[in-house]
Image (spheres, rainbow, N blue to C red):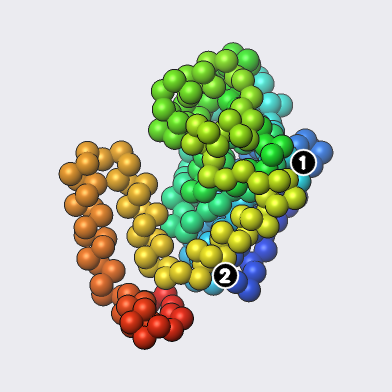
Amino acid sequence: MSSPHQSVVALQIRDDAVAVVRIERPEVKNALSVAVREQLAETFRALAGNDRVRAIVLTGGEQYFVAGADVREFAGASPIGMYRRHTEYLWEAISRCPKPVIAAVNGFALGGGCELAMHCDIIVAGQSARFGQPEVKLGLMPGAGGTQRLIRAVGKFQAMRIALTGCLVTAPEALAMGMVSEVVSDERTLPRALELAAEIAALPPLAVAQIKEVMLLGADLPLDSALALERKAFQLLFDSRDQKEGASAFLEKRKAIYSGE
C-alpha cells in the first residue's frame, strides 16, 4: 500500500503545452486512496496556474484507469470521520480546473474511477474500457458525483440502471448513451487523447477557457440566464489580441499565431 509520501501521481509537461497526469498504483489497479486524491488535487491546482500548460490529459495505465476507491481506507469508517475528510475539496481541484481535461480510459473506471473520468471534459475510451458505479453492492452509493454528474450526462433512465444495479458499461455502450466522447482501440487511447489535447492547446487559450467555463456553469442555469452568460463571455473575447489575430489571419489566408493575450 502506498504511503502518503510516496509519489502515486506522475506529471509530464510536454513541449506542445499539454500536461500528462498519470495515476501510478498498479499493485491495486490504481485504487483511489486519500494519498492519490491529495496528490491529484495538488497537481491540478499547480497546473491551473501554470501558463505553460493549455490542456491536460489524465490517465491510469494500459490495463486500467482507476478500479475504484480504496475500500480498506473506509471499510470501518464513521459518518463524522468521512465528513471530516472533506474529499469534496480534493475533487474540486479537478472539476474547477480552468483548462480542458481529457481522460484517457483503458480497462476499469469503476466507482470513484468512473466519477474521476466524469470530472473531465472529454473522455477517450479504449475498447477495453468498462465504466460502472458498483457502490450499491457495498451497501453504499456514489459519493463524488456518480449520481449527479451521471444523470446530467446520460439522462434518468440509463443513470438509474447504472447506479441501482452496479452493472458494468462497455465502451461502445458508453459511447451510445453519451457517457464518453470517442472509442478507439486500446493502443490508440492515450495517443488519441494527446492528439485532441494538442489540437486544443494550439487554439486561443482565453477562448478555450471561456467556452469551458460557460458550458459548465450554463448547464445548470435557466436557459435565458445561460444565454446571457454566453453573450457576455462572447463580447469579452473581443478585447483579446488573439481574437484580432484570428480574424486577421483568416482574412489574410495565413496560419494564426496565438499568444494567449
Residue drawn 49% across and 56% down?
A: 100
* Up/down of 51 relative to 154, above or below: below
Count of numbered circles in the view: 2
* Observer-nearest of 113 and 249: 249
Residue 20 appears in the rendering: yes
Residue 250, quarter of the rendered image: bottom left
Q: Position of residue 235 (x, y in %)?
A: 22, 65
Count residues near mark 1 (Cα–Cα under 10 Å), then give few for <14, some for 14-19, many for 20+: some
Indicate the position of residue 115 as horizontal and vertical percent values: 55, 35
Q: Residue at x 62, y 59 (%)?
A: 194
The CA distance from mark 1 to mark 2 is 26 Å
Picture quadrant where residue 117 is located: top right
- Disc 2 marks which residue? 17
Q: Of helix, strand and loop, which one carries label 2?
A: loop
Identify which residue is drawn at 67% across, 50% down: 189
Rendered position, 245 above or below 127: below
Establish if 56 lies above or below 38. Answer: below
Extreme bottom residue here?
Answer: 252
The x and y percentages for residue 118 are: 52, 40
Report helix, strand or loop for mark 1. loop
Mark 2 is surrounded, within 10 Å at the Cα level, by few (under 14), some (14 to 19) or many (20 or more) other residues, namely: some
Q: Is residue 189 rendered to the left or right of residue 84?
A: right
Amino acid type assigned to the residue bearing label 1 in the image: Gln
Q: Give x and y (percent) for residue 259.
A: 43, 79
Q: Is residue 61 left or right of residue 229?
A: right
Q: Which mark is residue 63?
A: 1
